[in-house]
Image: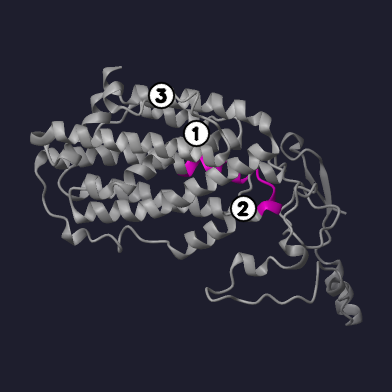
Amino acid sequence: MPTVQIKDEARIGTEARIKLEPSSYLQKLSKTGTPDLAWMDDHGEWGMRAVPGNLGLRLKDIAIGSYGVVPEHGAAHNSMAPRGSSVPSDVPALGFTVNDKAECWADNVMELYEEAVARQWSSARDIPWDELKPLPDDLERAMCQLCTFLTEVEFIAADAPTRWMSRINHDFLEVKLFLATQAMDEARHTDVFRKRALANGGGLGKSSALAELSLKRIFDAGSFSAQTARLHLLGEGFVLTMFRQGEFIAPSRVDQEIFRRCMQDESRHVGYGTMHLRTQLKMRPDLAEEVHAELDDAESILLQTFSVPESVEPMAVLMGGGIKNFDHGMELQGNLWRRIVGEYLQRCDSAGLDRRPRCILPTDFGALMAD
């Protein structure tokens, strides 16, 4: 009898042997004419009915009976069998490495997923590109440089979380669903900032070696929680605060609309990351030192990033309304920087991480420039 042998033991942990009998049941059925139907008695919990709410049938509406119980530890069979289904003993394992709920869970993840699905938008249709008018060269160059930086940032915000999706146990399906929406959000952000750089007579600006180093460190983080700290508490949180100030940064209504829509998406990602770390740190207080070490390094790179003109000057040009008002733009940027640092520390507080004694980010932008 033919068998399928899964040999990659390093990936799946154990070897599975699955007997293939593609025609035995059909042959029996053709002879007897009597169906087996035993599968009808082999199922999970039975007899419950999910009731849609005002917003339709949401994940929380089907979290009923045993199906609504998210285990503290993912199923040992390590397969893609849906949580709550009847699982045979010989399913092939997939070698998930994130098998504890605390490693990936956030109490708001189901609501964030539903919001993400409901608020998807199109950079092609929902941005009023036809209203984009020519800008003075200094404003257009500054906007294009900012869009170049944001395109870099949005690449990693999609690539890094999805790198972990295949490692997360399928019993935590709600997390995987949310991470899939984050990848879609970030793909759209990459799309919209690249379009903006090319849509108004400008073009892509200068990439940054320091920004790329920061993004590489996010991608190379050794654990899902370490990545979350770098990406959500600091990286995406930094960008979220910028987007919230889009009305002061944006030189046109088109740019304001881009920032407004991206802000809605980023707030979900940051909300998930903050709550995830809160869950993880409650379960594993010893993890705090690893997270602190990641943020020590991330803050240091961020400070160095602001030592180069292409990271500082575009925002000052935009916020001041042009080179002629550069000094005023730097003052406004100082206000934005204080808000960036303040909101970052608030997120750390919410996550249960006392970052204030170790944070090296000055709240005074002038001191940052002097350094």
179 or 296, nearer to the observer: 296
User: What colour scheme has been applied to the protein in the rendered image?
Assistant: one colour
Expressed as whole percent of the image width and height from the top left, the position of residue 1 reads: 88, 54
Residue flagged by tag 3: what amino acid is it? Ile
Q: Quadrant of residue 320?
A: top left
Label 3, on which residue?
A: 301
Q: Taking the image as drawn, is residue 344 in sight? A: yes
Q: Secondary structure at mark 2?
A: loop
Q: Is residue 171 magenta?
A: yes
- Residues marked 3 and 1 touching at CB (< 8 Å): no
Q: Earlier in the sequence, mark 2 or mark 3?
A: 2
64 vs 324, left or right, is: right
Rendered image: mark on residue 230: 1
Label 2, on which residue?
A: 107
Seen at 57% across and 33% down, the residue is 226
Residue flagged by tag 1: what amino acid is it? Arg
Magenta span covers which residues?
158-172
